[in-house]
Amino acid sequence: MEKEKYITRAEECMFHVYNRFPVVFDHGEGVYLYDTDGKKYLDFGSGIGVMALGYGNKAYQDALKEQVDKLTHTSNLYYHLPMIEAAEKMTKLSGMDKIFFTNSGAEAIEGAIKVAKKYAFKRDGHAGHEIIAMQHSFHGRTVGALSATGTDHYREPFYPLMGGVKFANFNDLKSVEDAMDEKTCAILMEPIQGEGGIYPADASFIEGVRKLCDQHDILLIFDEIQCGMGRSGRLFAYQKYGVKPDILTSAKALGCGVPVGAFLVTNRVAENSLEPGDHGTTYGGNPLVCAAVSKVCDLMEEMKLPEHVEKTTAYLEKSLDELTERYDFVLGHRGMGFMQGLLLDTKLPVGQVVSKGLEHGLVVLSAGGNVLRLLPPLVVGEEEIDLMKTTLEEIFDAIEV
Ligand SMILES: *Cc1c(COP(=O)(O)O)cnc(C)c1O
């Protein structure tokens, strides 16, 4: 058992900013992870929704290897082909017009906020605009993204944060309307809230927010960093709702394992906001990550992953129904596609189930409000869903509540 030694070494020198689970992963294959002791885990977490293709996809790995040997970085002072191809594919697939590549989700949110502020600045001839974000939202840990994250305990130690953010209640159009005034330049929301507890937006809410934005020339920003890239059953959840944002953020599964994010905008926004000199990043969209994005776009289409998710969701939901029926402490489930939350009674802390999962060789996640969060790779099928369910049953049968 080398594991304990590895963990001791890590804790000697890594800043203790995470309470990590005592697992040292070594490699992955398909939808399974293996730790350094050779133990196998069914992965229903995907590294927090990143590994949409699962592990070891040959076409993806070959594309990266080829790019490593060719060129990994140029800076954004020049053009390169992987960026051009990734940008063409992403704008086509997303239905948006222009893209800017970032290194993370939080950085995509930072960019989206700057776009909205600059748009309003150009329109009104002055700064001082505000954005509306949602309670229980999560947009990232950098100061701007944190300022728009609707969970107090993430924010409080870091006050004062970026000002000019108001919070409205998710799925409550009236509260959005009440928060709006002449300073509002953008409404920022996740179509399906992730970290906050897997809350899908109501169609009427999303439609209502779009209408408010149109009436007042306010930009609608959809954060699809977690729910995007096929997880909802469409490439982007907005396509499912039929309500298009002005700014769309992506990350997590965008690169399926390389650090990349993006914000995408419509032509109207692109032509009336950021200009050369307003924004930048050294790494963002380098040849290596863009080769990944480009291949991920191809594979999403070739493997018909959104369609697979759409088809398989009913089976996943049925197994969650069965768990809900069988156990008193499972209160229900909610979600969309392969982004599902199993709601647990507070008597059974979700962290305990996540730990037990690892003991039983199942990787699952938690989310706010005592929710067991399932974000499997998009390639899982009925067989793996069955295994996830029977493993949870073993855990639930043995647990004293
Ligand atoms: C993970 C996440 C982010 C932040 O992304 P990072 O890459 O961790 O910075 C932002 N928004 C949503 C919805 C997320 O799930």
Image (cartoon, helix red, strand yellow):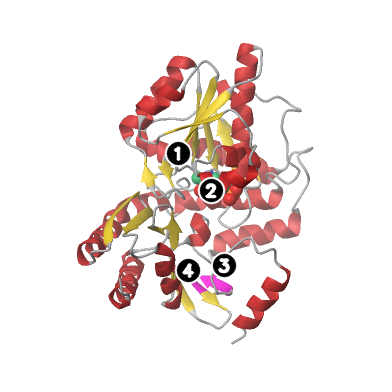
Residue at 44%, 55% in the rendered image: 367
Disc 3 residue type (three-letter): Arg
Q: Which amino acid does label 1 sit on?
A: Gln
Q: Name the residue under label 1.
A: 135
| Residue bearing mark 4 | 30
Q: Give the range drawn in magenta.
A: 25-33
- Could you tell me the amino acid type at mark 2? His
The quadrant of the image that shows the N terminus is bottom right
Residue 389 shows in this picture? yes
Residue 276, position as x, y percentages in the image:
74, 27
Q: Which element carries disc 2, helix, strand or loop?
A: helix
> What whole-number distance in Å separates the C-alpha atoms at marks 2 and 3?
19 Å
Q: Residue 20 carries which label?
A: 3
Q: In this view, does 391 lie above or below 204?
A: below
**Magenta stretch secondary structure, dominant:** strand
State the CA–CA distance, disc 1 to disc 2. 12 Å
From the viewer's perspective, tell me whether residue 20 is left or right of residue 339.
right
Residues 177 and 323: in front is 177
Q: Earlier in the sequence, mark 2 or mark 3?
A: 3
Name which residue type carries label 4: Gly
Which of the two discs, 3 and 4, sits closer to the camera? Answer: 3
Mark 4 or mark 2, which is nearer the start of the sequence? 4
In front: 211, or 62? Answer: 211
